[in-house]
Structure formats: C-alpha cells, structure tokens
Image (cartoon, rainbow, N blue to C red):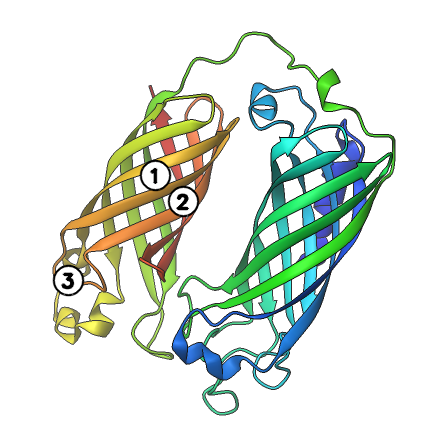
Amino acid sequence: MVTTIAVALVQVLVSAQQPCSIGARAHYGFLWPHRPSSWILVEGHAPAIELFAERKVSGAQHWHHDYAIPSYGLGVLYTGMANPDRIGAAVRVVPYLFLPFVQDDRHAFGLRVGWGVGYIAKPFERAENTKQIAIGSRINTAIQLMPEYRYRHHRVTLHAGIGIDHWSNGSVQLPNLGLNYLSVNAGMSYALEPPVEGSTLRPRSDEREPHLREWNIVGAFAVNETARPLSGQYGVVSLSGQRQWQVSSKSHLMAGVDLFNKGTLATVHPEMKERDRIEYTQLGVHGGYALGFGNGELFMHMGAYVYTPVEDEAPFFHRVGVRYRTGKHLIWNLSLKSHYAVADHWEFGVGYRWN
C-alpha cells in the first residue's frame, strides 16, 4: 500500500508544470505523553529520518495565489520511538501542503500540514504487550503539523522546523490514546529543474468564481470500539445536512443538523441491547469553519447533542475533516468525529449539494 501511494504521488509530481524537488530530513525528538498514563511508554530521545518529494502548485488557479503559491508533496518518516519492546518501529506516509506565511525568492516561513497513513509495529496485545496503552492497531492514520523555515539558493533548499507527528486509529480498535512524536528537524532538498518564480505565475482567467452558497447533505459510515479494548467493534452511520457560506477567498462558515446511530452505545449502556437499533439514533446541531482550496476544503465543526437516548461520553462533539467537490452536485467526505480530544469514530461518506 505504501509503495502504491508513493508511486502515485511521484507520477502526479512528474506530470505537473512546476519542477519536482526531492529531499531528506533528519529529526531528533521524543514521544510526547499528552496523557499522564502515557509516561510508561517514554524511554528516551528518538531520532528519525524522512524522505520527501514535493513541488509548488502551477499558479493556474486563483486559490494558488490566495495561499501565496503553496507546495504539495509526500513525506515518508521512520522512527523507533526509543521503545523497541512496547512500540517498535513507527512509520508514516503523509501527503502534505506547505502553506507559506512569508515568502520571497530566497526565504519562506510557513506551516506544513499533512494527513495520511501510519504504521506501528507493536500495538496493544492482551497476552504479550499489555503496557502498550496508546495504540491498538498496526495500521493507523497519521497527521503532521510543522512550522518550517526554508532558505533557497538556486536549486538547493535548506529546511528547518519543529514538528509534531500523531498516530491514531480513530477508535476503530482500542486502546486509542494515540502516539505523538515531537521533534526538531533539519534537511535539504534539490530541484530537478530550475524553479519557476512565483511572481511569473498567473491564473488561467482573471475572473473569479462567485462565492459559494450551497446546501449539502452527506451520509457516512465507519466502525468503532468504545469503553475498553476487545469490547467489540460496531457499525456507525451518520447523516449531516448544512448550509454553507463562503465569506472570503479562503474562508467558509456553516451551520447544520446531524443524525448519528452507533452500536457502541450498548457497550457503555447494556440496557440498550434490548432496544431496536433505530432507537440508538442521536440528534445534534453544529456550527463550523472551513478553509477552501479550490474544489477541496479543510473543515472543523463544533456541535452539541440535542437528543440522545442515553448519555454519551460528552454533551458536545467535534469534527475535523476534508471534503472535495466533483461535478455539479457530488461531494466526498473524510472526517473524524470526537468528544474533545477523544476520538469517537471516522466518517467515510458521500453527499449531494445544491445552491
């Protein structure tokens, strides 16, 4: 799977207009225990190595200029987490965007944001690895946030940053406290062809699309586990409808209504097992914000349960994810619903949109 992702991204990079850069980065950091119980996994500082390939966007679309000609790429990181017995090797393969806050012909400072696939060699095992209290599965999602400074000289670019990498399975399989690798890093990349200066790039059209005003409804599904490891995985379905307004070239606001139906309610409340599954349904409302990237967006919701048949883990819920629009009416969704910092379930979905 990792090979397939890498080959696909390289093909995209090679076929695009801007020159491709390849590079390597050395990390030095530690497992950051965001919960007191996670200290049991911390055994020292851990080096990591990362290989990456990236290129700048073509500049053909208006959103490319709204974000000061960002870069996109793929980063592959390997670390041992300084804990070979309980965690083992940790790998992540993350497609990412580098969004510059300040940029000129030589210098750039911005934020690298990535979301992809992670692997943990030694997850929780009831018989052999009970002290691995952070991750219950080998295959996970991986997220990276990294403020980064860049200095370019001709085809060579030097990189320095402070990053946090997070591994989690979204409560598909407990435990799911997650692993956080906090590191300082430095690296170098080389452009395979002379770079095109951002000041020479122009959109294909001087006319911008009118601000988005739409209704949309998205249905999604997933599986999750709650309460304790090995308590059982159950299906989850959700339906979310909202009104969305674009308020600037980058920003969107939204408000809507949600329906959730998840089988794990009966894990925490055994009396629910006697009820029909339709009676598990919860009703919520949400407000949200999104950053738009052409047909795609990165969004965040904050919501509250208006009705739930039994008490859930919290009265409020949160959602972070990405959506992509195709054609006139289709919208694709990948999001993670949580109660504060505790993952509840994924949402893999598709929806319909209209003005």
Q: Is residue 14 left or right of residue 347?
A: right
Q: Earlier in the sequence, mark 3 or mark 2?
A: 3
Q: Which residue is mark 3?
A: 276
Residue ID for mark 2: 349
User: Is residue 271 placed above or below 166 in the rendered structure?
Assistant: below
Q: Amino acid at mark 2?
A: Gly
Tell me whether the residue at label 1 lies in contact with that at label 2, contact meaning CB atoms closer than 8 angstroms. yes
Which residue is pictured at 18% across the width and 56% down the height?
A: 315
The image shows residue 203, relative to residue 153, as above or below, that is above
Residue with the most extreme bottom position: 127
Report the Cα–Cα distance between label 1 and label 2. Answer: 6 Å
Chain-order first, disc 3 or disc 1: 1
User: How much space separates mark 3 and mark 1, taking CA atoms?
Assistant: 24 Å
The residue shown at (77%, 29%) is: 18
Relative image position of residue 279 (x, y in whole percent): 14, 58
**Residue type pointed to by label 3:** Asp
- Tell me if label 3 and label 2 are in contact, CB under 8 Å: no
Q: Position of residue 351 (x, y in %)?
A: 38, 36
Q: CA distance from mark 3 to mark 2?
A: 24 Å
Residue at numbered disc 1:
218
Is residue 119 visible in the rendered structure shown here?
yes
Q: Depth check: 140 or 8 in front?
A: 140
